[in-house]
Image (tube, rainbow, N blue to C red):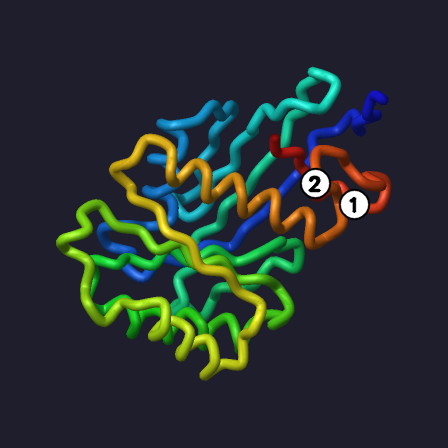
Amino acid sequence: MSIDFPEEKLTFTAACFSTNYQSSSSISIMKQYFMSTECLDIEYFKNIQVDFTHKLLGENGSKIECRNTYIEILPLIKTNKMNDKIDCFIIFFDLENSESLIELNKILNFIALNSDLNTKVYVINIYTNEKNIKSNLTEENINVYFGKYSIMNYDISNANLDSSDELVKVIDSITEDTLQDKNLFRGNKVIDTDKSRSACLII
């Protein structure tokens, strides 16, 4: 059975944070993602937003373009306004930065004050050398901060940035998971795309 895809590009939008903006900003991490996967029409806006197209394979062998937007949010900037079209939040949590829990506290406080707490938060623990991971940056300690702000809808995963495919797998799985939560597709089938243009197919 073939899938009838809408003529217009489907879209997916994530608001992103980093616990180490100076050396591992969300945009710089996405640049690394682009080096390991096939993306087209990559556009940067003021170094706080990147839009790109990801060609994905449908069940009948056809390809569909998904337009993705990743927006870097700086919690201490009061002029930030949360886009109501945000599909999810992504926090890049630097396991090699001793200040990451302090920064996580600021980020979660910002999310709690400025958004719907039902929007899922994805934490991606990033590192390049296991020997440099700080001993206090455990999943248990991360959980404590989410509990502090009563944010229950979240998920934690790990990505070694020196790996050629770990980051790609994690980011693509977040896209898939988010769209499944929104009931836009099940497995590899798009569901009722007429109801929303914010969809994309991951195989």
- Name the secondary structure under disc 1: loop
The image quadrant of residue 8 is: top right
Q: CA distance from mark 1 to mark 2?
A: 7 Å
Against 38, residue 24 (above or below) is below
Q: In the picture provided, is 182 more to the left or to the right than 168?
A: right
**Residue at numbered disc 1:** 196
Residue found at x 72% / y 23%: 59
Determine which of the numbered discs, if any, sits on residue 40 in the image.
none
Name the amino acid type tagged 2.
Answer: Ala
Location of residue 53 in the rendering, given as x and y in whole percent from the top left corner = 56, 29
Q: Looking at the image, do the residues carrying marks 1 and 2 touch, with CB atoms under 8 Å apart? A: yes
Horizontal and vertical percent position of residue 94: 28, 57
Q: Which residue is mark 2?
A: 199
Q: Relative to 122, is 23 on the left or the right?
A: left
Q: Is residue 77 above or below residue 41?
A: below
State the residue in front, 81 or 32: 32
Label 2 CA crowd tier, 10 Å (few <14, some 14–19, many 20+): many
Mark 1 crowdedness (10 Å alpha carbons): few <14, some 14-19, many ≥20: few
For residue 183, side relative to residue 17 (left or right): right
Q: Give how far across and how far down residue 68 sits, in percent.
A: 57, 38
Give the image location of residue 139, x and y in percent: 36, 67
The residue shown at (19%, 64%) is: 134
Can you say which quadrant of the picture contains the N terminus?
Answer: top right
Residue at 49% from the left image edge and 25% from the top image edge: 39
